[in-house]
Image (cartoon, helix red, strand yellow):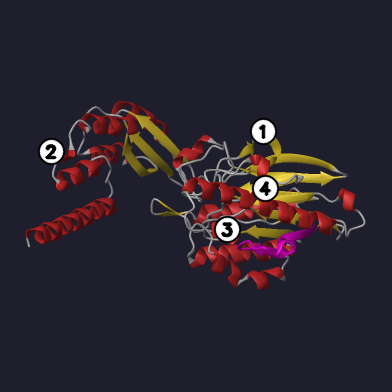
Amino acid sequence: MKILHTSDWHLGQNFYNKSRKNEHQQFLDWLLQQVVEQSIDAIIVAGDIFDTSTPPSYAREMYNKFVVDCSKLNCQLVLLGGNHDSVSVLKETQQLLKYMGTDVIPNTNDDYPTQVLPLKGKSGEVEALVCAIPFIRPRDVLTSQAGVSGVERQKQLGDAIKQHYANVYQAAVSKRENYENASEIPIVATGHLTAMGVQQSDSVRDIYVGNLDGFAADGFPPADYIALGHIHRPQIVAKQDHIRYCGSPIPLSFDELKSTKQVCIVEFEQGKRAISQLNVPTFQPLAEIKGDLESIETQLNQYIGLDGDQSVWLSIEVQTQDYLSDLQERISRLTQELNVEVLQLRRAREKRNQTLNQESAETLSELSPMDVFEKRIALEEFESESEKARLERMTVTFRQVMTEVNDGESE
């Protein structure tokens, strides 16, 4: 039995006003190719199939076509809902996709046996069981209680998730006893959450804000493999080789360029487990450039004469001692003859923090509300036309609010 573990596709993502459609389509085509070349029996997608709860129509089309293509290859699919996924959207086609060998688990419930899925090998016999646990929303496992502190609720949620895993795992153990080759059938568990001690990236959004900082690894059941999603960097959890995040297949933020994109393959044969990784090809070149203007110009020289259908998407962080009002124009001049697109342009964070510290000696009594607003806005970058328009709208709105407040005080 060979299982491919992937997660965090985020189909439909808008990346600095750029569509990832072509990248995602190339990844899905590559994934189908791996099913054939690696002789994969089943694919587990551990959450965040879509980027938003209202994915664009092309993203849904890609999703449905992938299910059909997998069915043609006789590859089982287990699709789990993540914190970005809409339960109702995944339920729309859940019953239909079941007929094509695809199990969609939008959310969890307390009917534990229904969350245990059999996976069949090439022999047609059941060769693995999956504790198919998606993103667990607090309301799915906790009842609201008045007077409970934040710390208490955090502990309650952690305990409830641990108990849910234990209950589903026990249901899998009970179901396994019904098979003649029970001792040879591994149990795989899934999850979409933040495990303690993992390295996150800028594109990962907290999913248990105010409730759960991280789930302790000892809360997972003793499954033979635990396929996790939500964290976009591939990594092993708590030094336990069988508990893994495979990471997202494409970089969802520029800081994810520091890690190679992968999918995991776990193979079970005669009671033995082997885990390997496949590096995902780069479908869209991205790069980060940091330094002062002179250094940035030097680094940009590597793109001189660079041909190709795809331009390189750049994030540029400028370190400068002075505030440059024409920064965007300067960078534009440096890149206008190059096959690159600057998607993110910002000033170095330490410079922004230094500016904040220099002004921290001022007291609120010395500043008007408009002064505070303008000083806070000055710490942000509004380089593109859309960002400048947003700044103007915010400024107008704030002035209107202050006018209404002042008018009310004078009455």
Callout 3 secondary element: loop
Residue identified by numbered label 3: 142
Pick out the residue farthest to the front. Answer: 147
User: Which-is-in-front pick, marks 2 and 1?
Assistant: 2
Disc 2 to disc 1: CB gap under 8 Å: no
Disc 4 residue crowd, few under 14, some 14–19, many 20+, Cα 10 Å? many
Closer to us: 121 or 88: 88
What residue is rendered at 32% in x and 30% in y? 350
What residue is rendered at 20% in x and 41% in y? 375
User: Which-is-in-front pick, marks 3 and 2?
Assistant: 3
Is the residue 295 above or below the residue 221 in the image? above
Closer to us: 193 or 407: 407
Residue identified by numbered label 2: 366
Q: Which residues are magenta?
A: 102-119
Between disc 4 and disc 1, whose residue precedes?
A: 4
Callout 1 secondary element: loop
Between disc 2 and disc 1, whose residue precedes?
A: 1
Residue identified by numbered label 4: 227
The disc labelled 3 sits on which kind of residue?
Answer: Leu
